[in-house]
């Protein structure tokens, strides 16, 4: 019984890892920053949408579907390690530092303006 449960959990984790790309992992982390204060209003969602569309060159028509995936990934996450691991594995140290600090700065700037 325990082996079946572990196998099921392992398959579920593998499924999550297969679906998770660098843009999706980054978008989920952005989303976590936006909702960090437990208040998610229309202005924040619009700001988040602009940021995701701009940074990842996603067609506006696809945002609603992608936003649902981002919310689901965020809701299911126990921690941020699965997202940061994807970014860490895909990017060189300097690239990670520059990309995240640039995007984090944009996100913070948009939140205060």
Image (spheres, grey):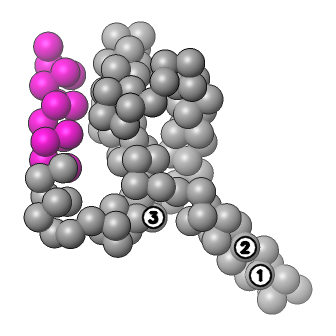
Name the foreground residue: 36 vs 92.
Answer: 92
Q: Which residues are magenta?
A: 100-113
Marks 3,1: beta carbons within 8 A: no
**Of the numbered discs in the image, which one, if any, rests on residue 82?**
3
- 3D distance between C-alphas at marks 3 and 1: 19 Å
Q: Which element carries disc 3, helix, strand or loop?
A: helix
Name the foreground residue: 36 vs 23.
Answer: 23
Q: Which element carries disc 1, helix, strand or loop?
A: helix
Q: Residue at x 11, y 52 (%)?
A: 98
Task: Examine the image and state in which quarter residue 71 appears.
Answer: top right
x, y percent for residue 79: 43, 60
Q: From the image, which quarter does the N terminus lie in?
A: bottom right
- Give the residue pinned by disc 1: 7
Name the foreground residue: 98 vs 57.
Answer: 57
- 3D distance between C-alphas at marks 1 and 2: 6 Å
Q: Is residue 74 left or right of residue 68?
A: left
Q: Residue at x 16, y 31 (%)?
A: 106
- Give the residue pinned by disc 2: 11
């Amino acid at each position: 019984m325990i082996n079946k449960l572990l196998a099921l959990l392992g398959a579920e984790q593998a499924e999550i890892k297969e679906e998770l790309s660098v843009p999706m992992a980054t978008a989920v982390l952005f989303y976590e920053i936006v909702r960090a204060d437990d208040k998610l209003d229309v202005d924040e969602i619009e700001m988040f949408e602009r940021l995701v569309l701009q940074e990842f060159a996603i067609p506006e028509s696809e945002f609603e579907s992608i936003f649902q995936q981002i919310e689901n990934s965020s809701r299911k996450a126990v921690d941020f390690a699965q997202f940061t691991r994807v970014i860490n594995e895909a990017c060189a140290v300097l690239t990670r530092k520059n990309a995240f600090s640039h995007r984090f700065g944009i996100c913070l700037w948009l939140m205060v303006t």
